[in-house]
Image (cartoon, rainbow, N blue to C red):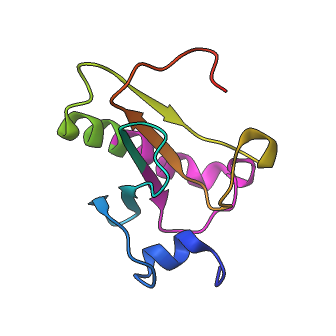
Amino acid sequence: MADCIFCKIVKGEIPCKKSEETEHFLAFHDIKPQAPAHILIIPKQHIARISELQNCHISLMGEMLLLAATIARQQGFEQDGYRLVLNCGENAGQEVFHIHLHLLAGRKFAWPPG
């Protein structure tokens, strides 16, 4: 998508502070962090929202979760814990319509969330 900010980040048109990059994913620090550590993990393939996922995306989403666990382990979040969040739609808090997984760590989180 030509106007998608995350697609522009993947293409290198907009800079980011990278955390990790694989063949299928880019992980980078959120510019509006909601925790001391706030990393976004995005697929390089544009998929606007979780509700658009299909059976062909099963392995992609599994790979996304494994990457989140790897980043959490590498960053030292595993011991104290971390939160993973996927939002779908405006009412759920989705602001950028390109699926992305929030990895949040570095503080205690309450339940239920916002």
Residue at the location (54% across, 74% down)? Answer: 7
Foreground pick, 54 / 30:
30
Name the spot of residue 90 as percent of width and height, x first: 78, 49
Please state if 55 lies on the left or on the right of 70 as rendered. Answer: right
Q: Give the range drawn in magenta.
A: 40-66
Number of numbered markers:
0
Quadrant for residue 47, please give it. bottom right
Which quadrant is home to the N terminus? bottom right
The residue closer to the viewer here, 80 or 34, is: 34
Find residue 103 and report its horizontal and vertical position in percent: 42, 40
56 within the magenta span? yes
Please provide percent x and percent y for residue 112. Answer: 64, 16
Residue 21 is at least partly visible in this image: no
4 shown above or below 101: below
Say which residue appears at 38% left-offset and 76% top-offset: 15
Residue 108 located left or right of residue 114: left
Residue at x 26% of width, y 40% of height: 70
Q: In which quarter of the image is the C terminus?
A: top right
What's the residue at 46%, 74% (across, down)? Answer: 9
Q: Is residue 12 above or below residue 5?
A: below
Q: Can you give x and y, in whole percent of width and height, for residue 68 in the image?
A: 36, 41
Left/right of residue 59 with respect to residue 48 in the rendered view: left
Q: Is residue 32 visible?
A: yes
108 or 5: nearer the eye?
Answer: 108
